[in-house]
Amino acid sequence: MTSRSECLGYEHAAGEELANLLASAARKRDEHWGRVATYSRKVFIPLTNLCRDSCGYCTFVKQPGEPGAGFLSPDEVMKIARRGEELGCKEALFSLGEKPELRYPEAARMLETLGYSSTLEYVVAMCDLVLKESTLIPHVNLGTMTRSEARRLKEVSGSVGMMLENISRRLVRPGMAHHACPDKVPVQRIRTLEATGAESTPTTTGILIGIGETWSERVDSLEAIASLHRRYGHIQEVIVQNFKAKPGTAMSRHSEPDLSDMLRTLAVARLILPAEVSLQAPPNLSEAFESYLDAGINDWGGVSPLTADHINPECAWPAIDEIEFRCAQKNVVLVERLTTYPRYVRDKDFVAPRAAAALSRMARADGYALEQIHADPDTAVLID
């Protein structure tokens, strides 16, 4: 196990020191995962773009009254799901703002019109609908939640996600990335990860780098995630995501992490995290994404042949064939997985019965995704 002091010492690793760091991380990946990188074929379902938080880097969120602000209808949800099925997708990734009804009366009225009293109730209902009327398996990025809320989501999903982003309370101070964001207070996010752990729910989390945090705060955040997994065994994957400056946001002029910074962070993440925890980096946020394989990643996350990345809409997904080609250049085989990682697929403690049934229909013997004949994604119409 790599010590905290060793990890702190890699902040400015370059040249031979960086090469040795990357080699150590890649060896640890190879020992557990082999020369394999996975991805999940998914559709984004942006259930609502209303949110009570005001992150300094976000363009996903809209305010009531802005064009396009609101909730998707059940028909709109199923339209996306069915088109995703045609293109061979197996995951329905529900992305949404956090608890907008607690800030905006307009959001509460929209939910009431739909027949629900909270965003949680509505996302549970839409996951239930997708499970009933499609072959897709929901993955839900609801945000902070209680243990009872985590229990309800587990019944209608294969996994849940919530980025820790960073454990530092500094980032909620005025002028920082998470100021005026009640759901980004670190203790609330840690409690949510404890709740999904207590409910034995396969959980995706991660850190967002380049938002004003220090190197030691990155290391502390990764160590906190590792500690949660050692306690509950539920962290299926950790994402290291690089900040992207977006016009019209408070952080539009903020500098972005460079490739070396990403590589150092990914390698340290691989060394800190237990070997069985998947390490992911998004392929659409770097032109040289194949270099992440040198730093010990084994997963590219959800890649959609149909829907845009609603969190980073300016960054198009690379084609799956292109990801496969770049993996091959690194002597890595690309394999499709499901929203639930193989070690959890048939574990009755970690997967509720309905999700388990859906997963069993989609999974091959080793827990990865069955290959299926599907429509040509080149003929797909991108759904915004």
Image (spheres, rainbow, N blue to C red):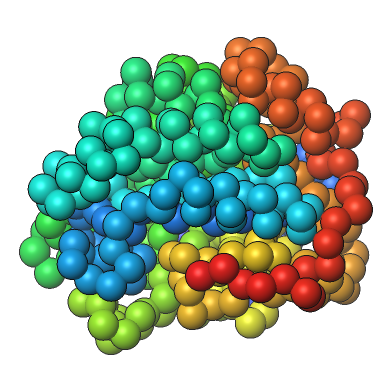
Give me the residue at 24% from left, 47% from top.
Answer: 110
Pinpoint residue 2: horizontal percent, then vertical percent: 56, 44
- Up/down of 360 relative to 298, above or below: above
Tell me: 277 left or right of 248. Answer: right
Residue 303 seen by the camera: yes
Q: From the viewer's perspective, is residue 253 above or below residue 16?
A: below
**Viewer-proximal residue among 297 and 120:** 120
Across and down, in percent, residue 337 comes to 76, 44
Q: Residue at x 55, y 56 (%)?
A: 44
Give the total of numbered labels.
0
Towards the viewer: 230 or 307? 307
Residue 16: x percent and y percent?
Answer: 66, 74
Which quarter of the image is occupied by the N terminus? top right
Instruction: Give the residue at x 64% y 16%.
Output: 353
| For residue 201, above or below residue 225 | above
181 displayed left or right of 327:
left
**Of residues 325 and 169, which is closer to you in this image?**
325
Q: Residue at x 25, y 42 (%)?
A: 113
When asked about the image quadrant of residue 68, the answer is bottom left
In the rendered image, is residue 212 in sight? no
Judged left or right of residue 353, residue 245 is left
Q: Position of residue 328 (x, y in %)?
A: 89, 68
Q: Quadrant of residue 243?
A: bottom left
- Tell which of 51 and 288 is nearer to you: 51
